Image (cartoon, rainbow, N blue to C red):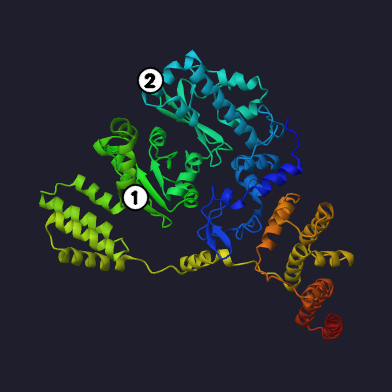
């Protein structure tokens, strides 16, 4: 069992960590004013509303409202407890973590997600041991070595082997007292017609799939001894921790290089990713299906704006590349194509031509999507035949007409003109005709879509509207947090906020100030004693655009507004009653209510 992490260690981790360095591993941040902004990792958005204040060491999303310090960020994005997040942040910063603070490896008493992640971690260790340390694993190890995967690479990707045994893993977890409900939920087991569980993966090389944080959440098993009717690859089913439309193979290893290189390489298969990694190309990922999903694209958009496709060079691979190029039209990205020569897949090419040749191909051989499409069309038409020439030209122009850049249009028109021995003027006339035809077919702008786009564009800058009382509460609480004299005066006068969420944060502030015995409040440290709602509210208040100083008159006005909130509520109530009296024509009641309204407003003005 882990020992409770002392405050001294938490303070050490906090002092040696920059929240920007940690969040940058998950979000592509850009400076805007004094803060940094990026796409929120907790919900999908087009306009960056996720902000990081480096001076205060906090983050806040103006759209979803999440906020906190570096530990809260790790807790949210990796589903960790506070102690686990402290250890995670320490390890990110290479800060030594004493053994007594780390949890026992056999602890399964946690949330469902953490239990399943722990099970996959243990299963991967067992499969790895069988592959590297047992006679049962020898054929699988020989297969991997035959594909130039050495022990170091096998260890990097946690590769393993599931033997042809129907209950080895099942017994392993039963010995650890894991109940049947959790075993079924894990996806590691299947069941027969009688309802008995058995190991899902048997006689397969096991490739772990990790989440963005590096936690193993699924497996892909490659069959060693192919039998008729047996799938070459078998993937884990979807579980509470694994959604194949979100997962990207190798993303946790590739994130840093993706950010550094400002591009990601999309491969078709896991072995291609692993071989490329060994060759020194470490920014590669593979999806769990044939095309990238919206969720996967959003994840990548937080890291880079360039996707390069590197699929197999054979005919099916070229067709898959064509589908990808024509389907990937997300305007958050620029796209490129890396065509592997000699109809080889990347793994074969690396093994035959060598790592340097592949690195050169990746660095210098990136085509534009249009260049790939023109080459693709040429493959499918006999350009010595006039009919095919016209078809090639029509297909090409239907793609060129989509380009926005006049320079690109001119470049590809010139290329086609040279190849087909046709004048650029003739091709440009065809393009003009095509543009006019498309303009006629194009539907008029849908006003709803226009309004939606405009609203989406300003989402990050639109704040919720607050009435006069709540605006006063928010500003007053901000000054109380940042200036001890305001805090002390409010406390001395027995002041209370109207809304419970502001009063709760104020009470926590007073309690923290007494315990910490310091006038200045460190916002990031203060976060550690708050619950989630208070953390979100504190981050929201601290991100408000406020002046550097306050005035005494300003504070008095806020206090008066809040203290008179009951009178303001009474004014609203009387006005409501006046409307009702007018509707039924009760002039006597109207007169009486008007007198009450005058009296209450007189009290307010005083």
**Along the viewing direction, whichever of 151 and 584 lies nearer the viewer:** 151
Q: Residue at x 17, y 47 (%)?
A: 381
Decide: few, some or many residues near mark 2? Use Cα within 10 Å; few <14, some 14-19, many ≥20.
few
Which residue is label 2 attached to?
Answer: 227
What is the secondary structure assignment of the residue under circle 1? strand
Which image quarter holds the N terminus? top right
Where is residue 213? Give x, y as percent. Answer: 56, 41
- Please say whether residue 368 is visible from this viewpoint: yes
Where is residue 56? Give x, y as percent. Answer: 66, 58
Please state if 351 lies on the left or on the right of 187 as rendered: left
Decide: few, some or many residues near mark 1? Use Cα within 10 Å; few <14, some 14-19, many ≥20.
many
Please state if 552 lies on the left or on the right of 426 as rendered: right
What is the secondary structure assignment of the residue under circle 2? loop
Q: Which tag, 2 or 1, sits closer to the chain's start?
A: 2
Please state if 234 lies on the left or on the right of 473 as rendered: left
Q: Residue at x 63, y 43 (%)?
A: 89
Which image quarter holds the C terminus? bottom right
Where is residue 496? Give x, y as percent. Answer: 84, 65
Q: Residue at x 47, y 17 (%)?
A: 137
Rounded to the nearest angstrom, the CA distance separating label 2 from label 1 is: 38 Å
Please state if 266 lies on the left or on the right of 388 as rendered: right
Which residue is label 1 attached to?
Answer: 336
- Specify the quadrant of the image occupied by residue 396: bottom left
**Disc assigned to residue 113:** none
- Specify the quadrant of the image occupied by residue 583: bottom right
Residue 221, placed above or below residue 450: above
Where is residue 332? Give x, y as percent. Answer: 43, 56
Please identify the residue farthest to the top as the structure is shown: 135
Task: Please state the total of marks drawn on the protein image.
Answer: 2
- Specify the quadrant of the image occupied by residue 173: top right
Residue mark closest to the camera, 2 vs 1: 1
- Please say whether residue 293 is visible from this viewpoint: no
């Amino acid at each position: 069992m882990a020992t409770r992490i002392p405050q001294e260690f938490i303070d050490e981790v906090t002092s040696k960590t920059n929240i920007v360095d940690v969040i940058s591993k998950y979000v592509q941040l850009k400076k805007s004013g004094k803060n940094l902004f990026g796409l929120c990792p907790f919900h999908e958005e087009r306009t960056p509303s996720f902000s990081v204040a480096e001076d205060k060491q906090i983050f806040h999303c103006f759209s979803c409202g999440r906020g906190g310090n570096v530990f809260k960020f790790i807790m949210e994005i990796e589903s960790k407890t506070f102690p686990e997040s402290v250890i995670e942040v320490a390890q990110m910063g290479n800060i030594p973590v004493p053994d007594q603070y780390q949890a026992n490896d056999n602890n399964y008493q946690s949330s469902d997600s953490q239990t399943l992640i722990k099970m996959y971690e243990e299963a991967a260790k067992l499969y790895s041991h069988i592959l590297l340390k047992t006679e049962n694993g020898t054929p699988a190890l020989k297969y991997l070595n035959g594909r130039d995967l050495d022990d170091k690479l096998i260890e990097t990707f946690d590769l393993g082997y599931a033997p042809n045994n129907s209950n080895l893993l099942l017994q392993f977890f039963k010995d650890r007292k894991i109940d049947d409900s959790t075993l079924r939920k894990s996806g590691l087991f299947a069941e027969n017609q009688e309802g008995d569980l058995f190991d899902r993966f048997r006689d397969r090389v096991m490739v772990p799939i990790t989440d963005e944080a590096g936690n193993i959440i699924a497996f892909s098993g490659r069959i060693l001894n192919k039998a008729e009717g047996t799938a070459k690859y078998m993937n884990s089913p979807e579980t509470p921790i694994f959604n194949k439309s979100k997962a990207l193979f190798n993303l946790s290893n590739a994130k840093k290089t993706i950010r550094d290189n400002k591009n990601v390489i999309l491969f078709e298969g896991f072995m291609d990713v692993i071989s490329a990694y060994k060759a020194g190309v470490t920014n590669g990922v593979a999806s769990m299906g044939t095309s990238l999903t919206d969720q996967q694209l959003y994840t990548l958009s937080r890291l880079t704006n360039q996707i390069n496709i590197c699929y197999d060079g054979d005919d099916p691979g070229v067709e898959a590349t064509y589908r990808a190029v024509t389907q990937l039209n997300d305007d958050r990205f620029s796209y490129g194509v890396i065509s592997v020569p000699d109809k080889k897949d990347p793994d074969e090419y690396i093994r035959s031509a060598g790592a340097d040749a592949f690195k050169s191909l990746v660095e210098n051989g990136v085509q534009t999507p249009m260049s790939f499409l023109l080459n693709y069309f040429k493959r499918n038409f006999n350009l010595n035949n006039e009919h095919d020439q016209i078809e090639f030209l029509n297909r090409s122009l239907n793609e060129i007409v989509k380009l926005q850049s006049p320079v690109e249009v001119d470049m590809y028109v010139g290329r086609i003109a040279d190849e087909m021995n046709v004048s650029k003027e003739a091709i440009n006339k065809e393009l003009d005709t095509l543009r006019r035809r498309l303009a006629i077919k194009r539907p008029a702008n849908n006003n709803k879509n226009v309004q939606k786009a405009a609203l989406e564009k300003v989402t990050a800058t639109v704040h919720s509207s607050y009435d006069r009382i709540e605006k006063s509460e928010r500003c007053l609480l901000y000054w109380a947090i940042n200036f001890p004299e305001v805090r002390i005066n409010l406390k001395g006068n027995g002041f209370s906020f109207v809304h419970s969420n502001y009063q709760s944060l104020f009470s926590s502030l007073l309690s923290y100030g007494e315990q910490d015995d310091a006038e200045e409040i460190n916002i990031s440290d203060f976060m550690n004693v708050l619950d989630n709602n208070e953390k979100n509210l504190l981050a929201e208040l601290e991100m408000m655009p406020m002046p550097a100083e306050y005035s005494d008159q300003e504070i008095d006005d806020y206090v008066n507004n809040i203290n008179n909130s009951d009178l303001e509520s009474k004014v609203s109530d009387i006005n409501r009653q006046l409307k009702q009296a007018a509707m039924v024509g009760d002039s006597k009641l109207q007169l009486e209510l008007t007198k009450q309204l005058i009296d209450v407003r007189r009290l307010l003005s005083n």
